Amino acid sequence: MGIQFDEKKRIFHLQAKDTSYVMEVVRDGFLIHLYWGKKINSYNQPNPVQLLDRGFSGNPYKEDRTFSLDTLPQEYPQFGNTDYRKPAYQIQLENGSTISDLRYTSHEVYRGKPKLEGMPATYANETEAETLAITMEDALTGLHVILNYTVFDQYNVITRSVRFINNGQESIKLLRALSSSIDFHDADFDFLHLHGAHNRERFIERAPLRPGIQSIESSRGASSHQHNPFFALLRKDATEFAGEVFGFNFVYSGNFLGQIEVDQFANSRVMMGINPFDFSWLLQPGDSFQTPEVVMVYSDSGLGDMSRTYHDLYREHLLRGQHKQKERPILVNNWEATYFDFNEEKILDIAKTGKELGMELFVLDDGWFGKRDDDTTSLGDWIVDQRKLPNGLNTLANQINDMGMQFGLWFEPEMISVESDLYREHPDWCLHVPGRNRSESRNQLVLDLSRDDVCEEITKQISNILASAPITYVKWDMNRHMTEVGSALLPAERQRETAHRYMLNLYKMLEEITTNFPHILFESCSGGGGRFDPGMLYYMPQTWTSDNTDAVSRLKIQYGTSLVYPIVTIGAHVSAVPNHQVHRITSLKMRGDVAMSGNFGYELDLTKMTTEEKEIVKEQTAHYKKIRKLVQYGDFYRLLSPFEGNDTAWLFTNKEKSEAIVSYYRVLAEPAAPTKVLKLDGIDVTKQYQLVGTDKIFGGDELTYVGINIPIELEGDFQSYVWHFQAI
Ligand code: DGJ
């Protein structure tokens, strides 16, 4: 177990729980990739690299026409000396040249996992993980590149990140600095990724790899709704339940690139990191640059197993703080109930009704500050609007506390409205480029968080509010992407650092605020799920999954999100019908059943519900409290995919497999529909299970191999059905 180095053969063998990863140092210091997959006991070179003299692949050693970087499977490929594929990094020297030549010089192995300075990352102590730091050097410039690999003892997980240190005499500009790169020896994979748009986040796409480059990326200044910083390579026969899967997830919330290049000899170069587009970073002598981390998961048991590895890892080794393992409160949020149009009385009415119906936390959304009656004003002026809340936040929060409800508050700290006191005072505090238009989006500009003075002022304002009232929850929103990315304080040669500096300072702000207010549960949001990434989860242990609250749309959104992110992080609310985003009418039951498969809450005017509806809601909150631990912290098994048909099903169970909740959803009623059986997965085939509320008992083997009937009584569109099993 752990990390071994064979001095004689110069081979590194990394072993995580059931995974091996093998590299070799060849010739005078090239680091090559040999294997990543199912664990092997020892590596005795069954697949040494086979070198051939290939046309148009040049040779660093004149005398050896078979040796070319163009055909060598590498660990951190460079540009400019015979490899024509895309490199993992690229530098520019003072003389304008852009090539470099890294060679292995030394390595270190130690227990545990060092913190990534100023950046989110998974964490582990000496009993949980081992780290390998390989130093590569470019002799001409004195550039040192440290490749960090951490293997987790209990998970099939290897994390990678890179540190650049300029130990030379001249400045070096990083033009590209990715966090990981692997050259797989074939291209016999499918490429799976999560794409989307605002209101349609994380839809699954799976397609065979083809020759050439295929990639996902964001250059929007956020990880984005459009592409999640995750992808997986699947063997052709891999399914949800079986087969080899290689997952890659970037622990970063800004611009990223995930890229696969299938080369002329059908090798696949797989890389991930900060998007090199419009990025550079200047390293003066002595300076260093740390890349964010990539979390790589291997599974030989399908996508479901890969997801459960990510879920376990992130719940235990990414989420932090007091709420990490706590059951999360059922909240009611006033956004879809009132939008900007509310007053104290209305808020108290909703909160009071929420309390009566079993909710635990009231969240006051957008519109409580400045003069914000719509989305055209006030971002940056974090002062309570006395017109709407004449008695202030403290009185309001106390009144809500007195009802027995916690109080939460919405912020959008990274933004500025042109129509705001802050903008009138500091027009240069937004991202902008001299002489260029400042493009607005949702009537707002992005604050230049690459500036320390801006961050300090905003941190102060937010902290003042948080200290002014008994606030136990914060929704941290971010509702536009970056344009005209430039900073008034950075010199010309550092303008392309702006977006990454923004991210680093945002993380710094989040670290400070979450540390100073450790009792507050933070939920990140970006127009719903536009920044659903592990970077944000490190600071804020749950995310508003999507602004789309329609139960049918949510099947795909939540299913796709669950590929990587733990259920406890997936905010899911019941909202009104007709739904405000897609105008669909679904039953309160289905809306509840879908939302109860996540981190549960409500987002509608509860005071307008009928007595009958209120009774259903009461039952839902009571039921969720019973199953909450299982849903939020249990193991999640996807059974039927909404991307493959009309039916969706999933299952929650605990590690002991003593209880299971199975949810089934049918979107449209079908004429002359066949009767259907649902086979379970994830339960113990040797156990007996009672169907809760009945005297029916089934073997786990029956439920798994034979399956249960989907009730024929389900009539009409948008149906759901839930089974609850207890082992006896
Ligand atoms: C976008 C969020 O996703 C919504 O839930 C809501 O908070 C609005 N912003 C408020 O402006």
Image: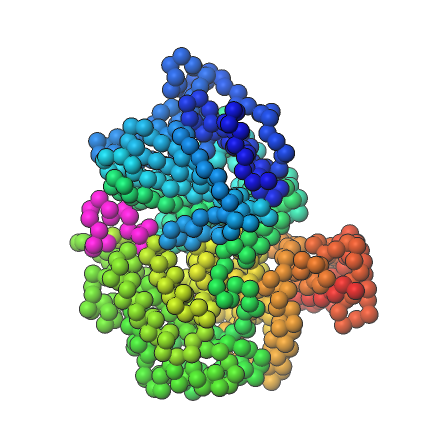
Q: On screen, 261 above or below 640?
A: above
Can the viewer see residue 207?
Answer: no
Q: Quadrant of the C terminus?
A: bottom right
Viewer-nearest residue: 456 or 572: 456
For residue 216, side relative to residue 369 (left or right): right
Tell me the magenta residue range.
487-502
- The residue sitting at 26% across, 59% down in the picture is 452
Q: Is residue 495 magenta?
A: yes
Name the spot of residue 328 as percent of width and height, x first: 54, 69
Viewer-nearest residue: 408 or 374: 408
Name the spot of residue 236 as percent of width and height, x first: 61, 38
Name the spot of residue 118 as percent of width and height, x first: 37, 53
Q: Is residue 470 magenta?
A: no
Q: On screen, 113 above or below 576?
A: above
- The residue sitting at 46% across, 46% down in the picture is 294
The extreme left residue here reads 435
Viewer-nearest residue: 612 or 241: 241
Q: Quadrant of residue 397?
A: bottom left
Question: How are the residues colored?
Answer: rainbow
- The residue sitting at 45% across, 52% down in the picture is 121
Q: On screen, 472 above or below 556?
A: below
Q: How many marks?
A: 0
Majority secondary structure of magenta residues: helix
Q: On screen, 433 above or below 359?
A: above
Can the viewer see residue 452?
Answer: yes
Name the spot of residue 224 as percent of width and height, x first: 42, 54
For residue 182, side relative to residue 630 (left or right): left
- The residue sitting at 68% across, 64% down in the picture is 661
